[in-house]
Image (tube, rainbow, N blue to C red):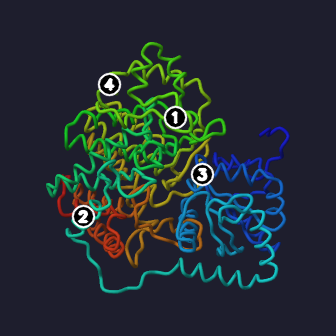
């Protein structure tokens, strides 16, 4: 796209890499703002809301097919007010409207497409939509005129539908008999994981397979406390299989977001900071329990990737790397056999045999390096380091995927926690230093003068009031730093942020933490996140933090807060225990504390 001959829209003033990707669309985009909804009300137009993130492959597809297309842009500009949201900057908006999409369609994903009225009440929801109808999916060229016609002819019906959907989303659970969570739920969850376990390839359930490291952390803790060997066996099989597959970058290290197949060969190539932080914790914990050097090596490799490619000069961690480069998904990571022979010469054949490189290829005519069929996969990793370095140096000459260099407080909190654990378990001071630098960055750049945290930072500007997850994950990181280094400043910071979190997010009536603060913009509803997704529930992490802080300081009120938070979500945890694995870790900690240190 030649920006020199294209006119920018309002998104050009934003800092988000995702919004800037759409700054030269012919669509007259607004960022999420009252100005957009005021315009919709004044001009009697519905709002077309599109939510995505910068490293999302299908977001790119929809942008190129539709949002760069003049015919689609004309329809949106004529009949709608179009609003773009970066889900990583505004997870509160994304969470609410993803609930809408899942309620209406039974599924979710990105890009998320919502059509609503000027009061932010949705009446249509979908994910990716093509330009023209195909495969049962409505195309924008057909959908947009139909909605515009309905808005003109049956506006009241659409608005009533939006009101009903909004009321459904805002429903509070009925107060019934108080549910409690006890140790029996740990066994229930363990047996559910056992039933869904893929004995041949590791992981749980059918593809696509996500790493979901907090599930593995629960199983490791279950093994440790209940002496159930199969919990460890399932975890080891999964950790080994994920590493051996193409979801792991065998040339440059780090894990991609998920595998599209059962055997972990073909990933969705984007790399997320949070996945790598949580996976590092899982490999570290497995190393702690087994003392097998393989798990320590993978942990070190993850940290090597993050510190090399995902760390800014001032010490903060960047968010993600794209799946696409040069317009193709995965291109940066794929190899032909000829390329390998040119780089490695006489050593090429050994590399090719080990890493499944062939003239035919294992993915769309090219090759994803993997160790799926290599029996001595760990020895291969150690014995071919010189060849890997040559491959990495060659790959560095390729056009890189986009790096989303915004700094998110929540995701930095997770990486701080992982590095602090790495410093403690691997006895590596450099990980401690890296974690401390990130804390210093947050204190310097992501706090308001009154101490209130910001959620994101890019190019000298912080924005968006921090959410419950930002506080919970950062406190987790600070507590891990304290456990590693016993620096009283880290404990004091954790206590201060915990007090602030309770002040801004605590539900005084029912317990638990709201998603966004009482000083933030009021949205369609004010939800409380209870289930785990790709990351653990903020409420579960906060409850664990309450337990740790109570035991560190002797603060009985925090112990009560931990119990109240658990009680708030007890019914939904009991209904779907495997979707609440970090809660199960918290329950395990409640009954089997790993260590009690009381400060005098």
Q: Secondary structure at mark 4?
A: helix
- The numbered mark, 3 or 2, whose residue comes first in the sequence reads 3
- Of marks 3 and 4, the one in the foreground: 4
Residue 368 percent coordinates (x, y):
48, 35
When asked about the image quadrant of residue 91, the answer is bottom right
Instruction: Evaluate whether residue 481 shows in this view.
Output: no
Q: Secondary structure at mark 2?
A: helix
* CB-based contact (under 8 Å), mark 4 and mark 1: no
Q: Would you name the residue on which mark 1 appears?
A: 312
- The numbered mark, 3 or 4, whose residue comes first in the sequence reads 3
How far is the residue under mark 4 from the one under mark 2?
36 Å
Task: Point out the residue furthest to the front here.
Answer: 360
How far is the residue under mark 3 from the one under mark 4?
36 Å
Q: Would you name the residue on which mark 2 appears?
A: 191
Left or right? Give the position of 37 relative to 178: right
Instruction: Evaluate whether residue 248 shows in this view.
Output: yes
- The numbered mark, 4 or 1, whose residue comes first in the sequence reads 1
- The numbered mark, 1 or 3, whose residue comes first in the sequence reads 3
Q: Would you name the residue on which mark 4 appears?
A: 382
């Amino acid at each position: 796209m030649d920006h020199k001959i294209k006119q920018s829209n309002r998104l050009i003033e934003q800092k988000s890499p995702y919004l800037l990707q759409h700054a030269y669309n012919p669509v007259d985009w607004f960022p999420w703002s009252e100005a957009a909804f005021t315009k919709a009300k004044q001009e009697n137009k519905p709002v077309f809301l599109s939510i995505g993130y910068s490293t999302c492959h299908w977001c790119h597809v929809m942008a190129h097919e539709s949002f760069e297309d003049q015919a689609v842009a004309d329809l949106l500009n004529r009949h709608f007010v179009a609003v773009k949201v970066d889900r990583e900057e505004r997870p509160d908006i994304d969470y609410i409207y993803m609930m809408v999409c899942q309620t209406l369609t039974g599924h979710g994903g990105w890009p998320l497409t919502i059509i609503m009225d000027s009061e932010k009440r949705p009446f249509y929801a979908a994910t990716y939509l093509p330009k023209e109808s195909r495969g049962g999916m409505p195309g924008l060229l057909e959908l947009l005129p139909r909605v515009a016609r309905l808005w003109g002819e049956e506006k009241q019906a659409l608005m009533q539908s939006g009101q009903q959907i909004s009321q459904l989303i805002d429903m509070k659970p009925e107060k019934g008999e108080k549910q409690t969570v006890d140790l029996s739920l740990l066994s229930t969850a363990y047996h559910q994981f056992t039933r869904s376990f893929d004995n041949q390839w590791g992981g749980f359930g059918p593809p696509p397979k996500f790493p979901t490291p907090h599930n593995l952390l629960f199983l490791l803790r279950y093994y440790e406390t209940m002496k159930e060997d199969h919990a460890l066996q399932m975890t080891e099989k999964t950790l080994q299989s994920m590493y051996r597959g193409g979801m792991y970058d065998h040339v440059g290290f780090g894990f991609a977001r998920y595998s599209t197949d059962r055997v972990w060969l073909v990933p969705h190539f984007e790399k997320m900071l949070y996945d790598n932080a949580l996976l590092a914790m899982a490999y570290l914990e497995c190393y702690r329990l087994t003392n097998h050097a393989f798990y320590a090596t993978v942990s070190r490799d993850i940290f090597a990737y993050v510190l090399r490619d995902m760390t800014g000069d001032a010490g903060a961690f960047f968010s993600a790397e794209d799946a696409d480069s040069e317009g193709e998904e995965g291109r940066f990571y794929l190899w032909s056999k000829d390329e390998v022979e040119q780089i490695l010469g006489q050593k090429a054949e050994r590399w090719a045999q080990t890493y499944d490189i062939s003239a035919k290829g294992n993915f769309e005519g090219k090759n994803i390096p993997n160790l799926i069929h290599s029996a001595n996969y760990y020895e291969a990793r150690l014995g071919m380091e010189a060849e890997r370095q040559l491959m990495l140096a060659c790959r560095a000459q390729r056009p890189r995927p986009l790096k989303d260099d915004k700094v998110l407080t929540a995701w930095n909190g997770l990486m701080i926690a992982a590095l602090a654990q790495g410093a403690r378990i691997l006895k590596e001071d450099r990980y401690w230093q890296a974690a401390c630098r990130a804390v210093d960055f947050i204190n310097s750049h992501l706090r308001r003068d009154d101490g209130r945290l910001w959620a994101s930072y890019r190019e000298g500007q912080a924005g968006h009031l921090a959410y419950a997850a930002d506080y919970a994950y950062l406190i987790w990181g600070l507590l891990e730093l304290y456990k590693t280094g016993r620096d009283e400043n880290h404990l004091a910071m954790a206590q201060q942020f915990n007090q602030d979190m309770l002040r801004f997010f605590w539900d005084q009536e029912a317990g638990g933490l709201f998603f966004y603060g009482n000083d933030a913009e009021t949205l369609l509803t004010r939800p409380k996140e209870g289930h785990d997704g790709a990351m653990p529930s903020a409420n579960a992490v906060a409850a664990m933090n309450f337990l740790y802080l109570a035991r560190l300081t002797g603060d009985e009120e925090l112990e009560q807060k931990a119990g109240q938070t658990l009680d708030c979500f007890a019914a939904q945890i009991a209904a779907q225990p495997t979707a609440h694995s970090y809660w199960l870790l918290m329950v395990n900690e409640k009954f089997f504390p790993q260590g009690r240190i009381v400060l005098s």
